[in-house]
């Protein structure tokens, strides 16, 4: 309970929680009533875009509180904020297809220009933060890194097997939609690559600053893992034709954006104050 109070101590975290709950309730109505291609479905995608948009605004505020580009944490927060903004922009473009063009959304679409930059920007920000708040010289971490390195490798194997062996089989490289196959491969494997780099380039033991920022760093890493699961499921559902706006894939993306935005919101300088 004390951890939850710490996470939602700030008003921005409470705002994120309210918007996230609204998205969950709206998605619940969509799934209970079995709605498809309705305005209610599209409202879910619009609310989903608002969550990382709030995270972007909060990230800029936190970066300024840390000293902006003059400090390592401030620079890290700038990249994290831009990552959330890129995902929000992609979602707004997705909503534009829904509300104004009133047509079936192509996949890939222009929304992927925004989505495609998300993992790299978030990864750069988190790697900068992890390097600054971790001990890099402990030889005892080498063995631990090997164990942690196995996790993204396993994720890559699972992604390739289920998406490209089970679903496409030998015809994967002769697909009539090579761009879709590329995007399906790009998103989950980019997530895996970013997590792998974070493991290999950062220490697993925190320094003083890292101990104080352990909670937001953990939230950010968990958010990236959630995003991998969402990307994996989205690629799977679009391949088998089961995806719909406001469905399980969007709920997973909502969870990822919520946790990532919470991580940014909790990167507050007050964590350095002695209680």
Image (cartoon, rainbow, N blue to C red):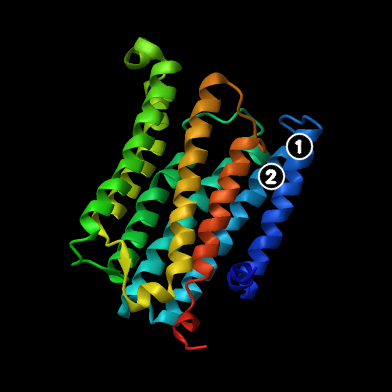
Q: Residues within 10 Å of mark 2 (few under 14, many from 20)?
A: many
Q: Look at the image and tell me in which quarter the N terminus lies.
A: bottom right
Does the CB distance between marks 2 and 1 fall below 8 Å? yes
Viewer-closest of 190 and 82: 190
Q: Residue at x 53, y 33 (%)?
A: 234
Q: Residue at x 31, y 61 (%)?
A: 204
Q: What's the mark number on residue 237? A: none
Q: Is the residue 136 above or below the residue 142 in the image?
A: below
Where residue 181 sits, quadrant-wise, is: top left
Q: Could you tell me residue 24's position as x and y percent? A: 71, 48
Q: Residues within 10 Å of mark 1 (few under 14, many from 20)?
A: some
Residue bearing the label numbered 2: 44
Q: Is the residue 221 above or below the residue 65 in the image?
A: above
Rounded to the nearest whole Å, what is the CA distance between mark 2 and mark 1? 9 Å
Whether residue 60 is visible to the viewer of this picture, yes or no, is yes
Q: Could you tell me residue 31's position as x and y percent? A: 75, 34
Q: Is the residue 274 above or below the residue 84 in the image?
A: below
Residue bearing the label numbered 1: 30
Whether residue 110 is visible to the viewer of this picture, yes or no, is no
Locate residue 225 relative to residue 13 in the image: left or right: left
């Amino acid at each position: 309970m004390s951890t939850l109070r710490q996470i939602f101590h700030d008003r921005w975290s409470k705002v994120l929680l309210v918007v996230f709950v609204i998205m969950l309730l709206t998605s619940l109505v969509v799934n209970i009533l079995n709605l498809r291609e309705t305005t209610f479905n599209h409202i879910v995608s619009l609310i989903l875009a608002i969550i990382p948009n709030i995270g972007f605004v909060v990230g800029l505020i936190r970066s300024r509180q840390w000293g902006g580009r003059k400090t390592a944490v401030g620079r890290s927060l700038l990249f994290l904020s831009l990552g959330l903004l890129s995902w929000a922009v992609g979602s707004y473009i997705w909503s534009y297809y829904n509300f104004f063009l009133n047509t079936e959304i192509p996949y890939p679409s222009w929304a992927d220009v925004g989505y495609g930059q998300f993992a790299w920007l978030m990864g750069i920000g988190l790697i900068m933060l992890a390097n600054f708040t971790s001990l890099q010289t402990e030889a005892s971490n080498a063995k631990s890194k090997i164990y942690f390195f196995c996790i993204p490798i396993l994720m890559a194997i699972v992604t390739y097997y289920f998406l490209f062996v089970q679903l496409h089989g030998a015809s994967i490289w002769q697909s009539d939609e090579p761009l879709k196959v590329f995007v399906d491969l790009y998103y989950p494997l980019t997530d895996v690559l970013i997590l792998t780099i974070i493991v290999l380039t950062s220490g697993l033991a925190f320094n003083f600053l890292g101990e104080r920022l352990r909670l937001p760093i953990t939230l950010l890493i968990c958010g990236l893992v959630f995003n991998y699961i969402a990307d994996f499921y989205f690629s799977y559902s679009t391949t088998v034709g089961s995806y719909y706006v406001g469905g399980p894939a969007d709920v997973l993306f909502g969870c990822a954006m919520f946790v990532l935005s919470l991580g940014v919101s909790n990167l507050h300088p007050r964590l350095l104050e002695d209680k």
